[in-house]
Image: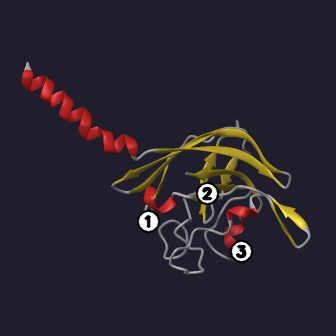
Amino acid sequence: MKLSRLLIATLLLSSLPAMAAEKVVAVRAISEAGVGKIIGIVKLADSPQGLLITPDLAELPPGERGFHIHENPSCAALEKDGKMVAGLAAGGHYDPGHSGKHEGPAGAGHSGDLPALKVADDGTATTAIIAPRLKIADVINRSIMIHAGSDNYSDSPKPLGGGGARIACGVIE
């Protein structure tokens, strides 16, 4: 009896670091007017393959969306060239190696390049993805961004994969 209680206590205590390593990020709609309502969450957890990102999102345009970690912990709109731009305060794609390249999640470019977010016809996104070059410690005090367009992981024919406007964002604390 004592051995089984000790075993249970050991198992529970050994699982605490794994549970503590998970982050839940509220994701909000964003526009030129600023940060809007919560449209869901994204869970982040370290895995042997990299950062596991599990979305539970709604109210997004169907199809593949550009999905990235951005350098700053803000989703606010900022002015650029006389116009307000949604989510501009998030800065650019997280690029700690200063590669200046957009080569996708497994490439040698921005570390913030994530696999595309797959949005169902009903506007929900629930398919988990892996960011093989990231872990939770890398993304704390950054933001996670969803773009209006898809992402071809190239700077051609459009810069930054053609993801376009920023439509949803969450601050990773």
Residue at the location (8% across, 22% down)?
2
The residue where tag 3 is placed is: 159
The residue where tag 1 is placed is: 133
Which three-letter amino acid code belongs to the residue tagged 1? Arg
Q: Position of residue 142 (x, y in %)?
A: 58, 59
Q: 158 left or right of 49? A: right
What kind of element bears circle 1? loop
Give whichever of discs 3 and 1 has the lower sequence position: 1
Look at the image and tell me in which quarter the N terminus lies. Answer: top left
* Crowding near the residue tagged with mark 3, few <14, some 14–19, many ≥20 C-alpha atoms within 10 Å: some
Q: Position of residue 84 (x, y in %)?
A: 86, 62
Q: Are marks 2 and 3 in contact (CB under 8 Å)?
A: no
Q: Position of residue 85 (x, y in %)?
A: 82, 62
Residue at the location (61% across, 69% down)?
153
Which three-letter amino acid code belongs to the residue tagged 2? Ser
State the count of labels.
Answer: 3
Q: Nearer the viewer, mark 1 or mark 2?
A: 2
Give whichever of discs 1 and 2 has the lower sequence position: 1
Separation of disc 2 and disc 3 at Cα? 20 Å
In the orientation shown, which residue stands out farthest toward the right? Answer: 82
Q: Are marks 3 and 1 in contact (CB under 8 Å)?
A: no
* Crowding near the residue tagged with mark 1, few <14, some 14–19, many ≥20 C-alpha atoms within 10 Å: some
Q: 169 left or right of 43? A: right
Q: Position of residue 122 (x, y in %)?
A: 70, 35
The residue where tag 2 is placed is: 143
Which three-letter amino acid code belongs to the residue tagged 3? Pro
